[in-house]
Amino acid sequence: MGSQPVINLFRHADDVTSYPAGTLVFAAEQPGDAMFVVQEGEVDVVIRDQVVETVGPGGILGELALIDQGPRSAAARARTDCKLVRIDPPRFKFLVQQSPFFAIEVMRVMAERLRRMDARL
């Protein structure tokens, strides 16, 4: 579920963190102090030991806890070796203010995830 506009914002980011395959990016229930953009590789989103989504280049994860300051609703684990750009609250606010399509993309991703979860019920 990659998105070209988001990856274009971060294609040349130099504040990238590498995660080897199998590494936990964040755990469920931990405080959500950042969201992530996948620059390279794939990350599994896991709820109750079940992979509910795999996020590839240009995709985002961890946005829900960043927006509502609640605990993480899912865990994220590197499926492959990957590079992620961390977006903390000040950077998120700046991006929303300076790049309206970034805010729209975050909302689009959240809506798609909500629709998929509704379809499972």
Image (tube, rainbow, N blue to C red):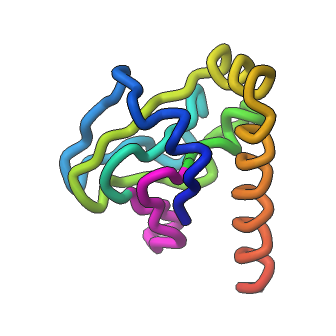
Question: Is-magenta flag for residue 99?
Answer: no
* Quadrant in the rendering for residue 98: top right
Residue 11 horizontal/vertical position (percent): 42, 37
Q: Is residue 53 magenta?
A: yes
Q: Quadrant of the N terminus?
A: bottom right
What kind of secondary structure does the magenta stretch mostly adopt?
A: strand
Residue 24, given in percent of the width and then of the height, sits at 33, 47
Marker count (numbered): 0
Nearer to me, 55 or 8 = 8
- Is residue 88 placed above or below 52 in the rendered structure? above
51 sits left or right of 33 in the view:
left
- Residue drawn at point x = 74 percent, y = 29 percent: 99
Spot the residue most to the bottom. Answer: 120
Which region is colored magenta?
Answer: 43-59
Residue 121 picture location, percent across and down: 77, 85
Judge by depth and name the residue closer to the eye, 7 or 106: 7
In the displayed structure, does residue 86 sit left or right of residue 103? left
Q: Residue visible at 80% across and 46% down? A: 104
Q: Which residue is painted at 53% across and 60% down in the image?
A: 2
From this viewpoint, is residue 114 visible?
yes
Residue toward you, 87 or 77: 87
> Compared with residue 44, is residue 13 higher up or lower down, i.e. above or below?
above
Which residue is nearer to you in this view: 100 or 46? 100
Q: Is residue 99 above or below residue 72?
A: above
12 sits left or right of 82 in the view = right
Q: Residue 42 lies in what quarter of the image?
A: bottom left
| Residue 63 image-quadrant placement | top right
Residue 31 seen: no
Residue 102 x %, y %? 71, 38
